[in-house]
Amino acid sequence: MTRILVTNDDGIHSDGLIVLARALERLGEVTVVAPAHEMSAASHSLTLTRPLRVDRIDSRHFSVDGTPTDCVTIAIGHLMKDRRPDIVLSGINRGPNLGDDTTYSGTVAGALEGTIHGLPGIAVSLVTRSNFDYTHAAEFAATLVEKVLADGLPKGTLLSVNVPVGPVRGVRITRQGVKTAKPSVIVGVDPRQRHYYWIGEDYSTPIHDDGTDYAAVADGLVSVTPLRNDLTDYRALDELRGKGWIPSHEARTGGAR
Ligand code: MN
């Protein structure tokens, strides 16, 4: 029996998670371990400074008062210890996770945490700001899960999937794009007359370069970006090694420590 772990960053009561879990039920046994409250932009954070509480809703639904990464860690390390999942799904996020926003995403982190434990991961996000109809995205996710379970993914790879709202018109395998960042910080005064600073709407401009996730969704297509936890910039690695301008203790001593 295929076992599917589902988490998200919008919280266990979010529609995107409920619709996704329901769509996956035909593929196997679905266990939901999700944050008790919204954890959007939690990135890959792990809670170490306080204990976590798990609320068992029923034998297949658990909420954790932590991040998506906490949820996957507790699921694999405890709740599903004796019946490890075969795949980790995260989502469906209420809004896109594209380009430079990828590393802020708690949705992506949930699937990423799975890959660290050797499991294939898929993060699913709905590309919309207003019409939150998750049905087509959930159907697409279920089809993709079937494909990944049958064919596998390279070890350590997760797929970040961004689905435009409405029926799926096509799919493109993409790379992570880049945006022109424009921070928006709202300054206000609290009831004690102290200033507060609230990070506001993202007014950044996505750059629609060919092959990017941004370009795919702008063309109305599902974007599927393979990601992995190794953030090494391999182009810079060769360049920096070639230049030899960073003082290297290893170079002088022949590698002895
Ligand atoms: Mn979210």
Image (tube, rainbow, N blue to C red):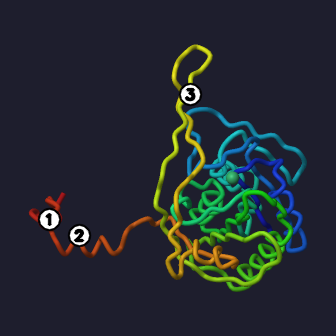
Q: Nearer the viewer, mark 1 or mark 3?
A: 3
What amino acid is labelled 2 in the image?
Answer: Leu
Asked if 170 appears above or below 83 in the picture, the reply is below
Q: Earlier in the sequence, mark 2 or mark 3?
A: 3
List x then y, in percent, for residue 168.
Answer: 78, 79
What amino acid is labelled 3 in the image?
Answer: Gly
Residue ID for mark 1: 245
- Observer-nearest of 76 and 12: 12
Considering the image in quadrants, where does the N terminus appear? bottom right
Q: CA distance from mark 2 to mark 3?
A: 44 Å
Q: Secondary structure under badge 2?
A: helix
Q: Earlier in the sequence, mark 1 or mark 3?
A: 3
Residue ID for mark 2: 240
Q: CA distance from mark 2 to mark 1?
A: 7 Å
Q: Secondary structure under badge 1?
A: loop
Residue ID for mark 3: 188
Considering the image in quadrants, where does the C terminus appear? bottom left
Which residue appears at 64% of the width and 68% of the height?
Answer: 119
Which residue appears at 63% of the width and 69% of the height?
Answer: 160
